[in-house]
Image (cartoon, rainbow, N blue to C red):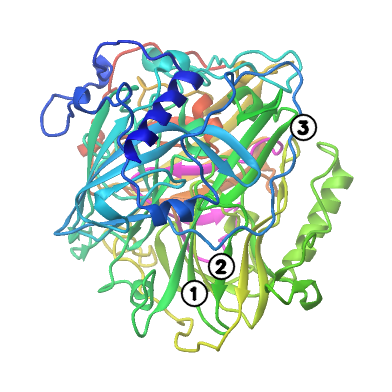
Amino acid sequence: MPGTTGAVVSRLHRVLWFQVRPRPSPVLPADRRRTRGPYMHDENRHDKRSSGLAISLDRRGFLRLGATLGAGLLLPDTLGCGDDPVLPPPPNLAVAPELFQPAWVRSQGRLLDIEVTITATQVTVGSYTFMTRAYTDVTVKQGTASFENGAYSGAIPGPTLLVQPGDTIRFTLINNLPDDGSANDPADCGIMGGSSSSSSGGGGAHGHLPGHSNNTTNLHVHGLHVDPGPPGDDVLLEIPPGGSYIFVFDIPEGVGMPDGTLANHPAGTYWYHPHVHRSTAIQVFGGMAGAILIRDEANDDLDKLFSPDPQPGQGKEQLLVLGEFMLQTCNGTTRLATYNEIVTDAAGTVDFFHINGQVNPILRMRPSEVQRHRLIHAGFHLPVDVVYVRVPDDQVDPATSLPKAGYTPFDYDCPAKKFDPAEHAAFEAAKNALRAQSVPYVQVATDGVTYAEPLPMPMANAVSEVEYLVGPGARVDILARFDAGTYQMVTLGYDLGFACSTPQVLATIVVEGEPDTSIQIPTSMKTPALYPSFDDPMKPGNQITNTRTLEFKVAVDPGADSTAGYHFTIDGKEFCEGRVDQCVALGAVEEWTINNVQEMASLHPFHIHVNSFLVTSINGKAPAHPMWRDTIFLPKEGYDMNGFAGTLTFRSRFLHYTGSYVLHCHMLQHEDIGMMQIVQVEADAACTPPVVMMCPPPP
């Protein structure tokens, strides 16, 4: 019952994260406060912490979620831990129930108007139960939805937003998390001489230290070409506990291009997540994420061919929101890892992936059927190296068509020793041997940009691993087709030296029944008009107007055992909101080179907001396949000129929008500690700092 559920959630808040006490109506910090008007919200009207969270829940939806998510349960009275971690068991990788598809909300009459509340809640994923933050209450004011009565509750990931070019998303975000003063990281575990999280990094007068004030939040629409200023994709905005804000995102339709043509926003796969500097990682890896799917059947060949609810002549598409939890278990209590535990790869932590809140769910296909798999890496930390491998027939249970108990496709694991060349070489050899056994599939889009033709996978001619690794924030659209049998979608793992991503089964695919040959993999596809090629140097919008070089580097203080000793810098500086790092003229066409310094401990997925870019060179070589991206790993090896571990060059057009936004490392703990810069786009590059404050000196 809604009243009962709300009362339990309020009880959770009191027991776990804060003491309910009278407090003044929350407002935004003075420097980020917006004039009250159409975009400011009445916080008092939505502060539900005293009366219980209002939840309306479809019973069938609850039963579907019950296998993977539980809300309204109680945990022990403390989330802290002692000095010694208890090594957690590995996640339960037994096959989960059928793949759960996140709830969706769809625009209606060119508008999607929703109200979303963030609360503290308990979840169960695989074999772990722990407290986290999640989008737990959704009310649809205008639009249609997959759930009844215009309300929804309790899921990781959050609801999928379905829109078209020309639509407006009106997204009211209500922060119903506990008071920030009680939302600090607990004591660290598994770190020699562990200490509370702190950092000497940037942030200026309005920053906060990683591991502190973890409940201040905001919203970023990752990959969308939309206005970065208020009330749009403004990631410099902060919404404190008890506060709220109405974001408005206008999806472009018929915008002018430099050559005089008109373009729509590309149809494709995008996502939303929090983006408050120094709280981003812990909120995202806790599950605060959801998909945004822009569909345009009139102009996008993939949307014509595939649909989540296919009509005659269409194939089925599956949304796979790949989350990543990093957990620590101390004194019998499992919780989200602290920033220090993340950065130092503390003993006792476990890091694993899940899809749509499930560990190893089941997908079903028919022989020869072509399905579109929209994969969103909504994790924070580790790369994904995807292949599809067939389970040997003698390892399939004939009664269920699932792998037999105890079967694994992996005959290798992460190296036992860090930075051990021999163990690293053996790990790579075993990983590549399994890659060679992958069933062929094709990629048809990355980061929402459709290719001109399908790309056969696994890639046979890549000049660098960054061409096929899927990093945090990135998206790939896959077309998969199999013969009858049982298959596993796996990530092969990745050894960083100082840490390692364990190979893992992401999903099990059962292919059975009558063959379906109604859909074929297309041989060519229409590319989006917003991102034309640079092939013709004389075409308007193709002439390079400026070049830049940036340097990503990590500096570690001797004996560092917490975030205070790690400096994640761009051009030798940590992030400061009071400094414009890249001033760009509106309409500029620029070529940027990003240098990655230090081969070891230097895996950085580069991401820039608002405008995607075309990769033209990786370590001095042209990529094997044209790549429009908004997120891509910087190469970390194979190039040693001038002391760089790797270098990447791209071209980008800075069109349609002025204002301030950011570029950063999308390994989110790196961004939180300082690896981020402000980009300001203005007419004639007439940039000024957004505020006046002291920025920290370079480390």
Q: Which residue is mark 1?
A: 371
The residue closer to the viewer here, 219 or 644, is: 219
- On residue 87, which mark appears? 3
Look at the image and tell me whether residue 665 can be seen.
no
Which is more N-terminal, label 1 or label 2? 2
The residue lying at 24 percent from left, 28 percent from top is 46
Callout 1 touching callout 3 (CB < 8 Å): no
Q: Residue furthest right?
A: 422
The residue lying at 54 percent from left, 14 percent from top is 200
Asked if residue 113 lies left or right of residue 200, the reply is left
- On residue 503, which mark appears? none
Q: Which residue is mark 2?
A: 363
Q: Amino acid at mark 2?
A: Leu
Magenta region includes residue 613: yes
Quadrant hosting residue 178: top left
Q: Which residues are magenta?
A: 599-628
The residue closer to the viewer here, 53 or 132, is: 53
